[in-house]
Amino acid sequence: MKKACFPKVLIAIPTYEGMKYCLNDFIIGLKSLIYDNFEVLFVDNSHSDTYFNLIQEQGYAVIKSKRFKNPRETIVNSRNLLRQIFLNGDYDYFFSVEQDVILTSEIIPTMLSLQKEIVSGVYYKTKGALGFKVYYPVLMTACDENGNIIETNKDDCLIRDMYREEVEIGKLIKVEASGLGCVMIARRVLEKVEFRYEEEKNAYDDMFFAIDTKKQGFQIWADTGLKCKHILEGKPEY
C-alpha cells in the first residue's frame, strides 16, 4: 500500500540540551514505530548548538528556536514554530510528543484508527514528598464536588487529576485536559487553536490548549490502552 493511502503525521518534538539523558531511549521508540507515513521534527531551544548537532548526527531533522528566561514562553514559542511548519506543509495530523515520553511501536496507527480530533496516550507524573511518590496519569477529568467523574460541557466545571486505577483498563475515555507529551491532533484543530499561556495564571500551555479547544467545540480523548514510559529520573530543572 502506498504512503498516500495513510494520513501524513508530523511527530513534533520540542527539546533542549537538558533532555540528552533520555535521547537514546527516545530514538529507540521512534525507530520502533510501525506506521508508514510520518516525519519527525525536533525543535531545539538550547542556548548552544551542541544538542542541535547531536540530533542531526542521529539522522533527524531539527531546527532552532529561541530560549527565554520564562520556561512557559520558551515551550510555547517552540510549539508554535512546530505548528506553523505543520500548517504550511501537507500534514494531516500533528503528533505532539515530549522527548522524555517513549513511544510504543503501534501508537500512531492505533490513535488514527480511533478517528478522533484529539487523542492522548497515557504517561505518568509523580507527586509526593519525603521519599513517598504517587503516580498520576497526565490527564484531568471533570468531577463533581465529591470528586466523582462526570461529563459536562460547562467551561467552568470542576476538574482534578485522574488516578492511576482509573486508567488501568484499556479503553477510550473523554477527558477535560491532557498533557502535550503524547497527543495526536487533527489538522482542523490547529487551524483554529494556537499554543499559548497567560502570564498571570499558574498553568502551562497544555491547560490553555484544553480550554481553547473546548471553546472551539473539540473533545479531548484518551486511549488508556496506550501507555508510554515517562523517563523522569535524570531530568534537570529548567
Image: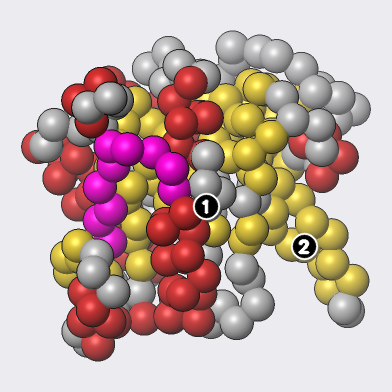
- What percent of the width, then of the height, locates residue 160? 73, 38
**Mark 2: secondary structure:** strand
- Magenta region: 33-42
Q: How is the image coloured?
A: secondary structure
* Badge 2 density bin: few <14, some 14–19, many ≥20, Cα 10 Å: few
Magenta-span inclusion, residue 199: no
Query: Which residue is most to the front?
Result: 1
- Label 1 with label 2: CB-CB less than 8 Å: no
Q: Residues within 10 Å of mark 1 (few under 14, many from 20)?
A: many
Residue 35 is inside the magenta segment: yes
What residue appears at the point 89 percent right and 71 percent down from the top-left corner? 132
**Residue, disc 2:** 127
Where in the figure is residue 16, as x and y percent of width and height? 35, 74
Q: Residue at x 73, y 42 (%)?
A: 161
Q: Say the numbered circle drawn on residue 103.
A: 1
Quarter-wise, where is residue 92 in the image? top left
Where 117 sits versus 70, above or below? above
Left or right position of 108 against 192: right
Q: Residue at 36% x, 81% y: name it.
A: 17
Q: Is residue 165 above or below residue 43?
A: above
**Toward the viewer: 70 or 238?**
238
Question: Which secondary structure, mark 1?
Answer: loop
Return the x and y of residue 63 as percentages of the image width and height: 17, 65
- Residue flagged by tag 1: what amino acid is it? Leu
Task: Please say whether residue 32 is visible from this viewpoint.
Answer: yes
Q: Residue at x 42, y 57 (%)?
A: 30
Residue at the left extreme?
Answer: 88
